[in-house]
Amino acid sequence: MLAVVLMIFIVEFLLFRTRVLNVSAVEAVNDIGVYSDENCGMRVCSISWGVLSPGEVEEVVVYVRNEGNESFALVLTPTNWNPENACQHLFFSWSCEEKRIEVGEVVRITQSLRVSPHTKGITGFSFDIIFETRKYLIADINMDGVVDVYDAVTVFVAYGSTPEDSNWNPDVDLYRDGVIDIFDATLVLKDYGKTWKP
């Protein structure tokens, strides 16, 4: 009996420690330059997260430069998850709070990828990271300059929907993962009460 219990424990441990290799493509739109060094000499087109085990966190630093003629807010959006359910096991975040990036300014950004400790069955995955400019905070869905009850209600009405549903609102899919869920709602909650007008 002890041998059977020990064997089950070993199998579960090996499944739990399945190592995962993954990579992200980087897409910078508008007037954003993404670089691997603070002197902005080497552009970043992709990020290799290395080999991760469930429960691990990997951090990658990039430098973003405003290469346009106007200041903007920077938004990073993970999208195009492969396999599609990978976003249920991976948690992407970044360190730079929404702030104005002035013309020519270079900002250091730490991106983090945390793998759920309960991840099983995924042997590799990829996703894209889109660097975008905005004139309003990302959670300001109606773009009136303040994250308020109107934005929260808009999320509530569309909550749980996908593009096939009648209450789907693509403006509320802040994570661009094809479903309006707790991740989108959390962004509104995080910035609730903030004002920012161009």
Image (tube, rainbow, N blue to C red):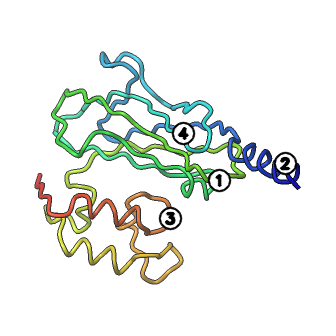
Q: Which quarter of the picture shows residue 159?
A: bottom left
Q: Could you say which disc has been placed on residue 178 in the image?
A: 3
Query: Which of the two residues, 166 or 91, is positioned nearer the viewer here?
Result: 91
Residue 110 is left or right of residue 198, and the answer is: right
Query: Which of the two residues, 19 or 2, is positioned nearer the viewer here?
Result: 2
In the rendered view, would you say 8 is above or below 149? above
Is disc 2 in contact with disc 3, using a CB cutoff of under 8 Å? Answer: no
Q: Could you say which disc has been placed on residue 15 in the image?
A: none
At a point 14% along the width and 58% down the height, the residue shown is 194
Residue 197 is left or right of residue 182, and the answer is: left
Residue 78 is left or right of residue 14, and the answer is: left
Residue 47 in picture, x, y percent from top left: 51, 32
Dot 1 alpha-carbon crowd within 10 angstroms: few under 14, some 14 to 19, many 20 or more: few
Task: Give the position of the N terminus as an image quadrant.
Answer: bottom right
Three-letter amino acid code at the position of disc 4: Glu
Is disc 4 in contact with disc 3, using a CB cutoff of under 8 Å? Answer: no
The CA distance from mark 4 to mark 1 is 19 Å
Q: Secondary structure at mark 4?
A: loop
Three-letter amino acid code at the position of disc 1: Pro
Three-letter amino acid code at the position of disc 2: Met
The CA distance from mark 2 to mark 4 is 25 Å
At a point 87% along the width and 53% down the height, the residue shown is 4
Three-letter amino acid code at the position of disc 3: Gly
Could you tell which of marks 2 and 4 lies nearer the N-terminus?
A: 2
The CA distance from mark 2 to mark 3 is 40 Å
At a point 81% along the width and 48% down the height, the residue shown is 6
Residue 112 in picture, x, y percent from top left: 43, 39
Which residue matches tag 1? Answer: 83
Marks 2, 3: nearer the viewer: 2
Which residue matches tag 4? Answer: 56
Q: Could you say which disc has been placed on residue 7 in the image?
A: 2
